[in-house]
Image (spheres, rainbow, N blue to C red):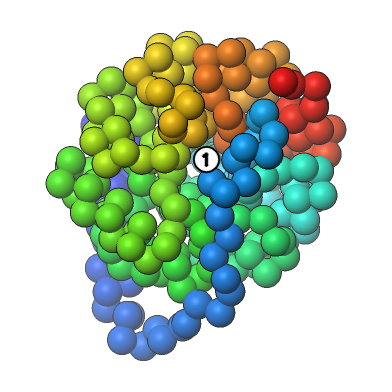
Amino acid sequence: MTILDDIIKAKQIEVDVIKAQRAADNRKRTVPLVSFLDAVNTQPMHVIAEFKRHSPSKGMINKDVEPAEQARIYQASGASMISVLTDYPYFKGTMADLVAVKEAVSLPVLNKDFIIDPVQIDRAYQHGADVILLIVGALTKEQFTNLYHYATAKGLEVLVEVHDETEVKTALAVDAPLIGINNRNLKTFETSLKQTEALAPLINTEKHVLVSESGIKTKADVVQVKAAGARAVLVGETLMKTSPEAMIKAFTEDLS
Ligand SMILES: O=C(O)c1ccccc1NCC(=O)[C@H](O)[C@H](O)COP(=O)(O)O
């Protein structure tokens, strides 16, 4: 059993609750969809800045920071998208965090959660997400393919997260434009940028936008994954713990 197995088990219970409450929740999306992919060729490296209070690997990261304020700082500092973790049991995030962030910024907003059912995609859409995450390793190939097409049919963009060669093939089978390689080993929690270097050659990075996720701490890390073909980095802990202004600036400037 990995932490991902535990999270998915808990998610099934959450999905049952969402389904039970669905009839009472008639929230309509009131905000336009904002594309991440449309702006991807405007600069050599993008920062996807994550609002992440807590994590299974690190425990409490920052309980004091407020989501709308943090998102405004991320946007003003040059981030290209804001990622909001909405899982509560393991990350202490909520859908209210997502709504607060979407209201605070004009950037695209990624709903980072562990999606296993279309009701979660409906919920993300209703709460103003522009992009959702699908973790290939959390789904069967059939589940993944159905959820992928369900989301894109609603106009959402999908960040398809992979951990190994088989999962890369699954992402390529739907021709996913946005593929994230997660550098975190979900058994040991260790992060290694070698994961991006190992899997990137399997992906045509001219055609697919490659995101290197997790464990990005320094400018040297960004330079390393860029050399492997990444066009964006997804950064959580580093931006929640240190000065996000200086970090985002350093991660995006003087790169060609
Ligand atoms: O962060 C964790 O401990 C974690 C554990 C199990 C599943 C997912 C997990 N994190 C989700 C993420 O993908 C990261 O929040 C994201 O890539 C940012 O990572 P970092 O910059 O290392 O905070």
Q: Which of the image's four quarters has the N terminus? A: top left
Residue at the image position 54 percent from the left and 24 percent from the top = 230
Residue type of the residue flagged with mark 1: Ser
Q: Secondary structure at mark 1?
A: strand
- Give the left or right position of residue 34, taking residue 188 as reference: right
The quadrant where residue 159 appears: top left
The image shows residue 117, relative to residue 7, as above or below, that is: below
The answer to whether residue 253 shows anywhere in this view is: yes
x then y, percent, for residue 171: 30, 35
Q: Nearer the viewer, residue 253 or 212?
A: 253
**What residue is disc 1 on?**
55
Residue at the image position 58 percent from the left and 29 percent from the top = 231
For disc 1, the neighbor class at 10 Å (few under 14, some 14 to 19, many from 20) is: some
x then y, percent, for residue 62: 68, 45
Residue at the image position 44 percent from the left and 53 percent from the top = 157
The answer to whether residue 247 shows anywhere in this view is: no
The image shows residue 148, relative to residue 191, as above or below, that is: below
Q: Nearer the viewer, residue 203 or 186?
A: 203
Residue at the image position 60 percent from the left and 40 percent from the top = 40
The image shows residue 55, relative to residue 11, as above or below, that is: above
Q: Nearer the viewer, residue 68 or 255?
A: 255
x then y, percent, for residue 227: 58, 13
Q: Which of the image's four quarters has the C terminus? A: top right
Asked whether mark 1 lies closer than 8 Å to ligand 1, one says: yes
x then y, percent, for residue 83: 58, 49
- Give the left or right position of residue 140, taking residue 194 as reference: left
The quadrant where residue 123 appears: bottom left
The quadrant where residue 42 appears: top right
